[in-house]
Amino acid sequence: MVPWRRSSLALVLIAVLLPLCLTRAKKVKVNSTRIANCELEPNSFVGLQFTGGLVLRCDEDDNFGGWSGLATSSKGQHAVSVSDRGHWLEMTLEYSTEANHGAMGPVSVSGAKVGPMRGLEGEKLDGKSWSDAESVVYDNRGDLLVSFERHHRVWRYQTPSFMDSKASTDSQLETMSTVLSEHCTYNGGAEGIEVLLDGSLVAFCEDAERGTLETFAGWVVPPSPADGKAIKAVRLDLTDGFRPTDLSLLPGGAGLMVLLRMHGKGRTGMRLGLIPEGMLTNGNNNGTDQARIKPAPVAEAWQSQDSPIDNMEGLSSDDVGGDVVRLSLISDDNFSASQRTVYLTFEANLTELTRFGVEKAKWVPAEGGASERTKAVVAGVAGGLAVALVLAGVAMVFVAVRHHRRAREARYHHICELTRVDFE
Ligand SMILES: *[C@@H]1O[C@H](CO)[C@@H](O)[C@H](O)[C@H]1NC(C)=O
Ligand SMILES: *[C@@H]1O[C@H](CO)[C@@H](O)[C@H](O)[C@H]1NC(C)=O
Ligand SMILES: *[C@@H]1O[C@H](CO)[C@@H](O)[C@H](O)[C@H]1NC(C)=O
Ligand SMILES: *[C@@H]1O[C@H](CO)[C@@H](O)[C@H](O)[C@H]1NC(C)=O
């Protein structure tokens, strides 16, 4: 065989075999250790109970970690997560009342599988900019929707074999992807998406709207936006440096729970806020109304010895019967040795939680007049100038005092000289 033929044969072989070599989902052993406690700050919803949690580890697979979204089913016993390295995690959680002071909580993990996500042609996702999955939810047909940032988009994966299936899209997902691409910053895409009872898709950008500090833009896209149904703009008012990292619709559509996360001043914290059902679907039509929703403050917790909070990015809720909702959360460990994958569960009386949301969530006016960021810059510059002026003043006084003292000393020496001359 002549050499060029051999090399072209090699190329053909590579082209044929490469898709087959695409790493497939594989079973992994996940080590779980129980979390006994999670201190919540007071002044939130008192009816939220921590029911147990797990620290998850998997040393055999480098792609275990970075879990950024969570979709649960079967009362929270089946969990799917996606990572910002473009991987799936699927696992089963065993629950027991021995978990946490008699509360029903997770005690172990079984049947875990990790595998790479695929693109529209079934191909491997190309590099970090195409693999940054941030949220996963079930749509109303039971398929999984996944949001990605950097190349902002939402794709659908068919269940149950989502791990080996290629992605697909439709007019609703395309519309949402376009809106996200137009408005979110490169690394500030939709960390949270959710599907409402009528099939509408909701998403928020992770970064504050341009020119603001505390306004987070989101959209509600109807199932068939092409039919002329308007896209609704929704804005959130989030204070204290918190950003939206996931969304979860409560059982029966009673409200939309928002998971918020914050890093700063050496602290990592999370909040849960609740948007009552009516606030999301009424008012604020088509971006014309600038009013913002301030979600009801359901929970707040900070990383500490008493509290396992990490970089919380995934949230899901399940109806466990008897008017009780189970909330499940997962953390993105950033693939860092100093962080952990924690899985936390909470329970609440759904009727009381919903009532709390309706009472405490508020409409607040748009961030006023000149943009807040401009105001902050102006305030910063003015502060800097004031400090500089004070420093200059202090320096001048210092120089004047020293000059005065030198002059006095000189005069004194001069007098001494004169007197000495007199005596001599
Ligand atoms: C799981 O991890 C813990 C803590 O690192 C360790 O003590 C335990 O032996 C591990 N369990 C298994 C089954 O590997
Ligand atoms: C929504 O916005 C579009 C374009 O900006 C406009 O054509 C449409 O009339 C608006 N609909 C409502 C209900 O305001
Ligand atoms: C982890 O990654 C997030 C971005 O995903 C970043 O904001 C945060 O500072 C990182 N560190 C910690 C401690 O979570
Ligand atoms: C939930 O709260 C409602 C209203 O307070 C109460 O009537 C109901 O009994 C509670 N359900 C459970 C399971 O505790």
Image (cartoon, helix red, strand yellow):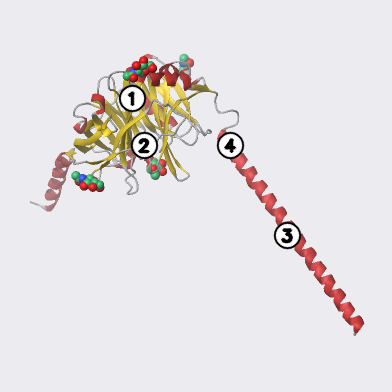
Q: Quadrant of residue 378?
A: top right
For residue 374, the mark is 4
Residue for badge 3:
398
Q: Which kind of residue does numbered mark 1 sit on?
A: Leu
Label 1: state its secondary structure: helix
Q: Nearer the viewer, residue 164 or 273?
A: 273
Label 1 to label 4: alpha-carbon separation:
35 Å
How far apart are labels 2 and 1 at the CA level?
37 Å
Residue 325 location in percent, x, y? 32, 23
Give the residue pinned by disc 2.
38
Q: Give the label on residue 173, or none.
A: 1
> Which is more toward the observer, 390 or 132?
390
Question: Of helix, strand and loop, which one carries label 3?
Answer: helix
Name which of mark 1 and mark 3 comes first in the sequence.
1
How packed mark 2 is, by other alpha carbons closer than 10 Å (few <14, some 14-19, many 20 or more), is: many
Vertical order, 303 against 294 (above or below): below
Check disc 2 and give the amino acid type: Cys
